[in-house]
Amino acid sequence: MAFAIMRCKKLKSWGSLKASFDHAFREKETPNADPARTPDNTHFYARTADQAFATMRASMPSKVRKNAVLGVEYMMTASPEWWQTATAEQKKAFFAQSVDWLKHKYGEEHIITATIHADETTPHLTAVVIPIDERGRLNARSFIGGTKDALSRDQDSFADAVRHLGLERGVKGSKAKHTAIRQWYGELARRGEAVRKAAVTPDELKPRKLSWLWSESPEAVAERISKRLAPELARAQAVDGLKAEARQLRQGLTKSQQELAESQRELSYAKAQLDSWDFINQTLEENMDLKRKLFEAMDARQIRITAEAQMREFKRREAELNELNELKRQQEAERREAERQRELEAERQRQAEAREQRERDRRSRSSGLSR
């Protein structure tokens, strides 16, 4: 039976985000990846680590808490045996369903990266999403919760999304543990020794006497040797599978070591912050007067900042009022100038009409005299 596999990890610092992007885009050395197959990797959203980092920063809300989860990293795959028998269409459908599941949960606008890694032993999808809730705030708890029950529900939902591809959900509450790499190598060594001991010797090839008259036929010799070697050969055939699983475990160990180093760095930073706050608290407890003065100074500074802001707002409004008054003066001057021009035009019209009237009167008197 093949299982659907989905895991997620909280990314709480920009350093861990950068490390995740560098791994996704193979911009740093990845020991468990085959460089010859890296061009086969597929990127759905950001194409480079820098682009992903820039998109992440641009998508961040204006206010971010110090302890906020900045991103959530997902790894989605299936049991190794499923990839060996799945068709190309089934593999394509698996990755499409995985991306659709993320879209439905977080919204496509919040998916920063989604990459198919085809250069590792088992193909898988890695993705980084930004957990922004409907109020536009970073809120990883609303998506993945703070308990194992929330992750279990997500694993149920993801398994349902790919169930039609022949994948099942793993056993809920399973106590199964990953086998240590040292144990795997020990098993490989034991299997190799078994194969060495299974070698056929010349004496085994000689027909055995069945009675004083009869001996084994060549067919019987072959059957006898085959029966003896069958269990050892079966175990020997598992060596390749064990080696592949050992490589996967080694890859997981490398990634776990990287995550541990990142966690240790974050822990050191948190401890330094905690020590700083402890010192501050101790100092404030020992000197309450200093604390009171500090608050008074902060209040005075806030009052000064508020007064300065009000003064700036007053000056801004005063400037706007002056601009408005200037605009009104200009409009009034333009109106008066237009009215003056109309009056001048009317006066010119009256003078022209008066001249015409005088001319008509003159012509009338001239005609009267001539008669």
Image (cartoon, grey):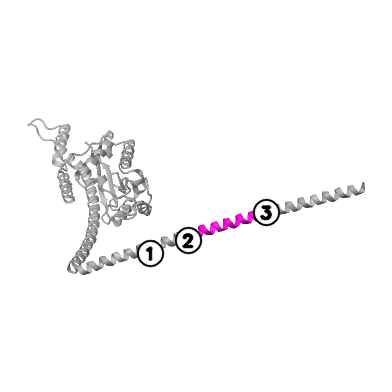
Look at the image and say whether residue 137 sits in the magenta stretch.
no
Q: Nearer the viewer, residue 106 or 49?
A: 106
Residue hosting label 3: 343
Q: Quadrant of the N terminus?
A: top left
Q: Amino acid at mark 1?
A: Glu
Label 2 Cα neighbours within 10 Å, binned few <14 / some 14-19 / many ≥20: few
Kind of element beneath mark 2: helix
Closer to viewer: mark 1 or mark 3: 3
Residue at (51, 57) in percent of width and height: 324
Look at the image and say whether residue 339 sits in the magenta stretch.
yes
Residue 326 drawn at (x, y percent): 53, 59
Q: Determine if residue 305 is in view.
A: yes
Residue hosting label 2: 319
Mark earlier in primary sequence (1, 3): 1
Q: Nearer the viewer, residue 88 or 103?
A: 103
* Magenta segment: 319-340
Q: Nearer the viewer, residue 85 or 350?
A: 350
Label 1 Cα neighbours within 10 Å, binned few <14 / some 14-19 / many ≥20: few
